[in-house]
């Protein structure tokens, strides 16, 4: 897989080997090295947790309401990295029971969809509906690869969710270790984010699940703090940056906020590229029309891949010759710039863009 990321700039076999070695010795900005090996409980409990987790790209994370079978059947054709079978906000209260049953059936019917993380978003702990969701959905023959827990405001929310998940799985906990993605949707959740992730990571070390990401629920967050939404989302600057910073501190993914005007492709492009520059690894979607714009924003361009590959090659050449600092395309190369280049190639490698 590593040679794929280097194929844009291949001069000699030694160059390819240099790329390979540099990538093997680097860790991505979030998450761990990818692997095609199936996840198991032993992987969750490794002493080196950060390097054991399989990387699952989620540039595009799209919600599909669980009560709508017609939309659920379209999942294989959506072209998204992560399809979220939805029990929460996208489902009316009188449709919750129907959504649970549909999702349980669709997990078995869909099976494994190549290149798509089949996920489920349950209702929040505070809703009083989460336990019912888990009790029904976790009886499916094929369990979801990822579980999303919305409105994760306190450490107690994580504790209760984990207890209920274990209870719903029963004896099946021995063979099942899903990814877990939590949400920040309130001021309380933002203040408690570090403690929440620390507890979730402790459960990950026990093999209950793999803490793998955080989602910014911006609409609920704005409502909670009384902010008025603007086109440039300037009122969310602090929260948006803190979320990505803390997520990266835990080496997990950060999924950016929803862009609600699905007909405004240009506005979506601007906000998506802004999120990618901030360090987010993906974005939430609410409409199929948003997929290609968001996917492109969170995937390095061919030009960016060329830059990264050539910089890494040049660095290795200077290292071999004993030369210290050097310039590349008019810039002095230092360690942070080299890490940026490595992250670009890791992203391409993980999403199989090239």
Image (tube, rainbow, N blue to C red):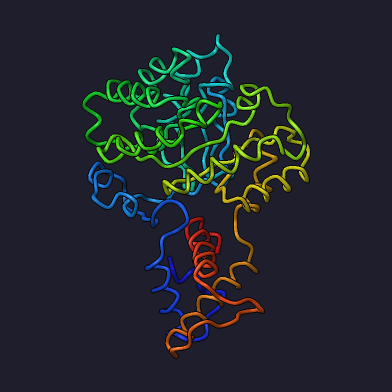
* Residue at image location 53% in from the left, 61% down from the top: 348
Task: State the residue in front, 77 or 57.
Answer: 57
Query: In the figure, residue 78 lies in which quadrant?
Result: top right
Decide if residue 237 is on the left or right side of residue 29.
right
In the rendered image, is residue 200 in sight?
A: yes
Q: Is residue 287 above or below residue 17?
A: above
Q: Residue at x 69, y 26 (%)?
A: 227
Which residue is located at x 44 percent, y 12 percent?
128
Q: Position of residue 68 (x, y in %)?
A: 58, 22
Q: Nearer the viewer, residue 173 or 137?
A: 173
Task: Tell me where residue 349 appears, x and y as whole percent.
Answer: 48, 61
Q: Where does the image place residue 171, in percent across and percent down from the top left?
A: 21, 26
Q: Nearer the viewer, residue 276 or 7?
A: 276
Image coordinates of residue 144 in percent, x first then y, are: 40, 33
Q: In the rendered image, which quarter contains the C terminus?
A: bottom right
Front in this rendered view, residue 14 or 142 = 14
Residue furthest out toward the top: 94
Which quadrant holds the N terminus? Answer: bottom left
Residue placed furthest toward the bottom: 321
Residue at point 59% right, 77% down?
Answer: 332
Residue 292 in view of the camera: no
Residue 138 against residue 262 in the figure, above or below: above
Q: How many labels sit on residues? A: 0
Above or below for 284 versus 91: below
């Amino acid at each position: 897989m590593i040679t794929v990321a280097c194929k844009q700039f291949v001069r000699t076999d030694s160059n390819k080997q240099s790329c390979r070695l540099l990538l093997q010795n680097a860790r991505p900005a979030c998450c761990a090295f990818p692997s095609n090996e199936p996840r198991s409980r032993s992987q969750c409990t490794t002493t080196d947790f950060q390097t054991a987790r399989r990387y699952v790209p989620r540039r595009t994370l799209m919600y599909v309401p669980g009560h709508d079978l017609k939309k659920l059947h379209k999942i294989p054709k959506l072209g998204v990295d992560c399809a979220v079978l939805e029990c929460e906000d996208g489902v009316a209260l009188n449709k919750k029971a129907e959504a649970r049953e549909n999702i349980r059936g669709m997990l078995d019917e869909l099976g494994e969809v190549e290149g798509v993380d089949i996920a489920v978003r349950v209702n929040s702990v505070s809703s009083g509906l989460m336990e019912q969701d888990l009790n029904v959905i976790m009886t499916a023959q094929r369990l979801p690869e990822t579980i999303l827990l919305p409105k994760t405001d306190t450490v107690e929310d994580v504790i209760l969710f984990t207890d209920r998940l274990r209870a719903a799985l029963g004896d099946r906990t021995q063979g099942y270790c899903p990814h877990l993605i939590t949400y920040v949707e309130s001021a309380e959740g933002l203040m408690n984010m570090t403690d929440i992730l620390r507890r979730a990571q402790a459960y990950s070390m026990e093999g209950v699940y793999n803490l793998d990401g955080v989602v910014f629920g911006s609409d609920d967050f704005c409502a909670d703090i009384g902010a008025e939404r603007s086109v440039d989302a300037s009122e969310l600057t602090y929260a948006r940056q803190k979320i990505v910073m803390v997520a990266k501190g835990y080496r997990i993914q950060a999924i950016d906020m929803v862009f609600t005007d699905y007909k405004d492709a240009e506005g979506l492009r601007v906000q998506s590229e802004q999120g990618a520059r901030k360090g987010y690894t993906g974005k939430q979607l609410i409409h199929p029309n948003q997929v290609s714009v968001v996917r492109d924003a969170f995937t390095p361009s061919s030009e960016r891949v060329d830059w990264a590959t050539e910089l890494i090659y040049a660095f290795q050449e200077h290292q071999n010759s004993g030369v210290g600092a050097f310039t590349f395309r008019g810039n002095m190369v230092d360690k942070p710039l080299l890490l940026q280049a490595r992250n670009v190639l890791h992203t391409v490698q993980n999403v199989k863009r090239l």
